[in-house]
Each structure stands twice: as C-alpha cells, then as structure tokens.
Image (cartoon, rainbow, N blue to C red):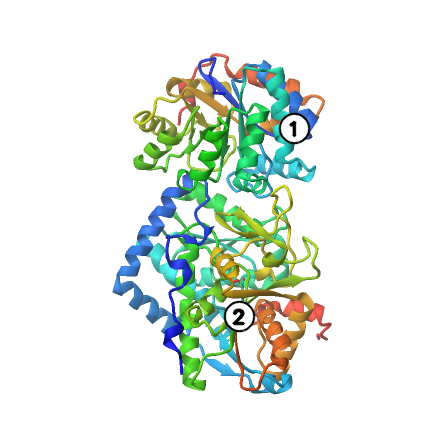
Amino acid sequence: MAIHFHNQPGLVVYLTIGDPDLATSKRIALAAIDAGADVLELGVPFSDPLADGPVIQRASERAVHNGTSMEDVLALASSLRKERPSVGLVIFSYLNPILRMGMESFAAAAEKAGVDAVLVTDLTVEESEEYRAALRKHRLQPIFLAAPTSPDDRLARIAEVSEGFIYAISRVGITGAQQQVAGDARELVTRLRRYTKLPIALGFGISNAAHVAVVAEYADAAVVGSAIVALIEQSSAQEAPTAVGKFIAALRTPVASKSAVS
Amino acid sequence: MIDETVKEMPSSATVPGRFDAYGGRYVPETLMAALQELEVAYADAQRDPAFASELSTLLHHYAGRPTPLYFASRLTESLGGAKIYLKREDLLHTGAHKINNCLGQGLLARRMGKRRIIAETGAGQHGVATATVCALFGMECIVYMGQEDMRRQELNVYRMRLLGAEVRGVSAGSATLKDAINEAMRDWVVNVRTTHYLLGSVLGAHPYPTMVRNFHRVIGIEARQQMLEMEGRLPNAVLACVGGGSNAIGAFYEFIPDKNVRLIGVEAGGRGSALGDHAARFQGGSPGVLQGTYSYVLQDDAGQISNTHSVSAGLDYASVGPEHAALHDSGRAEYVSASDDAALQATVRLARTEGILPALESAHAVAEAVRIAPAMDRNDILLINVSGRGDKDMGILARELKLQGA
Ligand SMILES: Cc1ncc(COP(=O)(O)O)c(C=O)c1O
C-alpha cells in the first residue's frame, strides 16, 4: 500500500508500542487516528535507543521490560489495518530487532500485517541495499531520515531511494520536545525540495499547535512523538487514549504562528 | 627464522569499514556527515608525514614507548611449561594501552579544529587517557561513565576530575560501558558540529574500528620485533583480553600473516554461562548491530541487547569489535573466556611471582596463559599483552581477596 496525507498539514504520530502495555497502545492508536492522525509510526521498543531523548528512552525501557516484541507490534499493526483501513502505518525501529527476525521474514510479516512503510533509525542509505530489496519485494515503502547536517549529495541519495514521504529532522539532535521549531528546519526542507517531489514530514521537537502551524508553512506534514509519549507517561492507562485524542485534535487548531520560529 | 613465505595480507583490508561481513556504519543520519568528515581527515592525516612524526614523538617522549617485552621467568617456572613473555603496556603513561589511541585521535581532533572532546569509559582507563590528552592539548573534555562503573572504578573518576574532565554518570540500563556509549552518542548527535567523539575501542561505525586499530598496531609491531631480538623466533601464541578488542587487535595485527602464531583473545567469562552473567560474545552471542557496527552481540530472541557481567569493567560489554568477528569466523584467531575467579587468581599469581599487578582486564589473558602453559613444551613461547596495570582495581581486589587494611 502507500502513504497518503489526507489533510494539510498532514499529521504523523509516533507511539512507542507496549508503553504502558499492548492493549493500551492499541486504544491510544485508535484514538490518535480518530483525532486526525494521517500516519502512525509504530515504534518498536529497543534496549539501546541511542537516537532518542529521555522521554522515549523511558517509554522504550518500560515496553522492553514488559516483553513487547516485533511480533507484537506487527500484530497490533494488523488489527489497526482491519479497523482503520485508510490510515498510514509505518514500522519505526532500530535495526537489530529486524535483523534478529531476518530481513525477509520481517518484510513478509509486515506486508501481511498491512503495513505501508518502514523507517529504521540507524540504517542509512549506504547500508540499505538488502533491506530495500526485501521491502520492495513485499511492497513496503522505505522511509529515510534527512538531517540538517546531511550535505546536498546525501539529500539527493535519500530522495532517490525514499518512498511515501521523507522524514526531515528539524534540528541537530535526538528526539525530545522543544520550545521552538529550529531555524535549521526550513533550510533543510528548502534544500530537500530540490531533489524530491515526495511529501516532506518534519519531526523532532514538534509539540504543540503553534509548532504545527509553523511546519505547515513549508513542510507537508508534522511528526509529533515525544510530546505524546510524555503525555502517555503522565496519564493512567485508563485516561491515556482520551488524553492523546484531545491533544492531537488540538494540534491543528489555528494559532498565531510566527512567534514559534527561532 | 621467520618464514616470510607464509605471510599474506590480512583478510580485512578489502572494503573500507568492512571486515568480511562485519563492521559497516549503522548510525542515525545526523552523524553521517561527521563520520565522513572524520574518515577524510584521518585519511589526510595518514598521508601527512608530519602527523606520523608528531604522534611518534608523543608516544615516545610523553607516553613512554616502546614498552618493554619482559621474560616472566618466575611465572614461567611456577607453571613448568611454555616460556611466558609479557608486553608491558601497563608501563605506559596513564597505566594502559588506551593512551596510544587517545594521542592519535587527540591530534586528529586538533587538525579538524574540534576543541570539545567527548568519550565513554568502562574501567576508566580510556577516560583517564582522554582527560590526559585533553589536558595536554588544552581541550574541553566530557566523559560518560556508567554509575556502576563509577562506583567500582572510583579512583579513575577522581583522576579524570583532577585532570579537568567533566565526568557524567549514566544510570540507564545496567549503568556500564554500553550505556555510557549510548549517552556519548546522544551527546555527539546533539553537538556534532563542534565535538569530536574520542571512541575508546575498535567499536562503533567506520572509520573507528580501523582507525583505533591502526593507533594500537604499534603494540604488535614492537612486540614482534622484540620477540625476534630476544628469542630469534616468533611466539607460539599471542594472548590478549578482549573487551571492545583494541589492545587485542593491536597486539594481534602484526602477527596475522604469521600463520604459525596462534592468536588467542580472552573474553570475560564472568560468574557463569547464563545470558547476563558474562561478556563472552563468541560463546553466547550472535551477529547483530549495536552502536554503529555489525558484529557478535549478546542478545535475546527479540534482538534486545542483554545485560552483561564481569568483575572487570573494561570487558563488561555486549558486543565486540567487528574485526574480531571476522577473525573468529575465519578461524585465524581463537576466542576463549576466563571467569571472574580465574582472573582474580591470575592477578595474585602475577603479582606474587613477578611483582607485576595487572589490570583485572589484562588478568583474563594471564589466566588463559596460566591454564594452557603447563601442558606446553618448555621451548614454546606465550606472549601476553598486559594491557594495563591494576592500581585502579585495588578497591575490588581488597574486597574480593579479603585483604587486610589499616
Ligand atoms: C587495561 C585495560 N585492558 C583492556 C581493556 C578492554 O578494552 P579493549 O578490549 O578495547 O582493549 C580496558 C578497557 O577499559 C582496559 O582498561
């Protein structure tokens, strides 16, 4: 299948699956979709999330601790696909859990689950040949990250092999909520546009409606992760789905946006 | 007496950053430009005779190279078998081989104009060596160290702070080396434009495993030469402990073409063979990606990285340098393990027969020599790389060996 953004700006929501538990993750995911998320990034918890800030680290640790595996995440994807056929589903993982399952078995299982695309945090274009072949075989779209530090020749390569959308990292750093959208972001998106017609989703640090409004000025979608994971951490399992739904619904409310640019 | 005809090029020299299937570069996109910059700067430095000459001057006048090769006659006698020679990296400035790499990368960071240095440390020896080089070059130094390691290697924490480094404790996971590397990598992702990550072993993404190995090659180059001078022939085996694998690859590399020389890497057998009780990657591990490189990793069925245990903080790590993975698979090097107890006993034996107190890490290599020497011929030769000295371990030794204090 393929990713579509039905709204402008599109909204991509990241969740660490298994935090606080699988059943709650499913209810949160449904609430997120119903509140307007176009795409869900289903985060596979990993013991050593070295690209993540403290919020997602803690979520990952809780989810690993309660035994959430790749199989669990794919099973969740499969049930979301049945209940919400048009949502975009992205498996968001570090490489090792995929290697452990086997690239081919993983891709086959992800296709069967109705997943649209895959993003691997610690896999860059250079090392991705076998991975992309496996995804292609199973009609899964590879999504790659583009960073403010990526020189133009890398952006060109990233654009060439990405499908679905490109995930532009808004600032030099790890995941985590920020006060403002970094000035790096607009420049990166401008550079990327020279190489791609794909939608560009901007993420890392996007945490409120003002940020989303700024992102909408030059990118196609906003990715919201740590802010939602933090909200889940602060809520009881009972309340989390409603809290997340409300939070997401409020992200597209119009606000005075200019003040949020650094 | 060396047979030049059995020499061949080390298997690993073909694809940059790859050691057969292992190695590579598995990092977040944000770091790619920095790794490429480092690769170019390193290649440029390698072509610059001024770099080599400055490094060798520092290694000689500052760090104390060459280190002696010492015939351990009383240890040899006590075991009644192979002759045992010790390569004395413990005599280097700061007390371990780590300074070889730190001087090299410190010079490189200076060439790149990066004045903020970050590092991870397990036993604290790499942190101390990094703090030392930063003091020498007037650079800012931040060292990440697991809180468990800070506790058990407290003397080195004091040393780093005295040298002007900032030591940041890491409480995540098992609060040991792996967790310190995660945190150092996060720092690097955030501060990549101004910061050099001075990685302390043959781990991580390309070019680190190759570059760090090259900075330690001097160990084997000297030892091979010294062996020929002292004995007129090569040893039957070279032994070294393997944490990330830097002292071992440094000691092994020059001997790789000498097919008759066994290369024996000794991992931490810890307190047992269950996952979580040791750090013997070649016994309980399988190929996977951790912290930038593809190598043997201790992991569970879901691909989550296991916790590890060793009495020595420097060997307490879930993965191993990718070049060792290739040497393992090709059979060119053998990997065995020594338990916590065997390492402690070997420490005492070396101290009491030779008056040399090895680091607990190095004691693992000594333990394997103690195990195999008695059954060997008296004309056989074992060369042990004593990667560091044991002063840092006095707290653990006092406790484990129930030594009497004041
Ligand atoms: C004395 C000593 N030997 C060995 C090691 C293990 O590292 P490597 O395997 O990279 O030599 C350490 C690490 O802290 C050390 O301090």
Rendered location of residue A222, percent (x, y): 46, 22
The answer to whether the residue labelled 1 contacts the one labelled 2, judged by CB atoms less than 8 Å apart, is no
Residue appearing at x 55%, y 27% in the figure: A111
Residue appearing at x 45%, y 20% in the figure: A221
Subunit bearing disc 1: A
Q: Quadrant of the C terminus of chain A?
A: top left
Rendered location of residue B324, percent (x, y): 50, 60
Q: Which three-letter amino acid code belongs to the residue tagged 2?
A: Gly
Relative horizontal placement of residue B51, taking residue A248 as reference (left or right): left
The residue nearer to you, when weighing A177 against B278, is B278
Q: Which three-letter amino acid code belongs to the residue tagged 1?
A: Gln
Look at the numbered disc 2 and say if its residue's Cβ is closer than 8 Å to ligand 1. yes
User: Residue under circle 1?
Assistant: A234
Above or below residue B97? Residue B145 is above
Subunit bearing disc 2: B
Tag 1, which secondary structure?
helix
**What label does residue B388 carry, if any?**
2
Judge if badges 1 and 2 mark residues of a common chain. Answer: no
**For discs 1 and 2, the disc positioned in front in the rendered view:** 2
Residue appearing at x 45%, y 34% in the figure: A132
Tag 2, which secondary structure?
loop
The residue nearer to you, when weighing B219 against A35, is B219
Relative horizontal placement of residue B7, taking residue A249 as reference (left or right): left
User: Is residue B65 among what the camera can see?
Assistant: no
Q: Measure the C-alpha gap from mark 1 to mark 2.
A: 47 Å
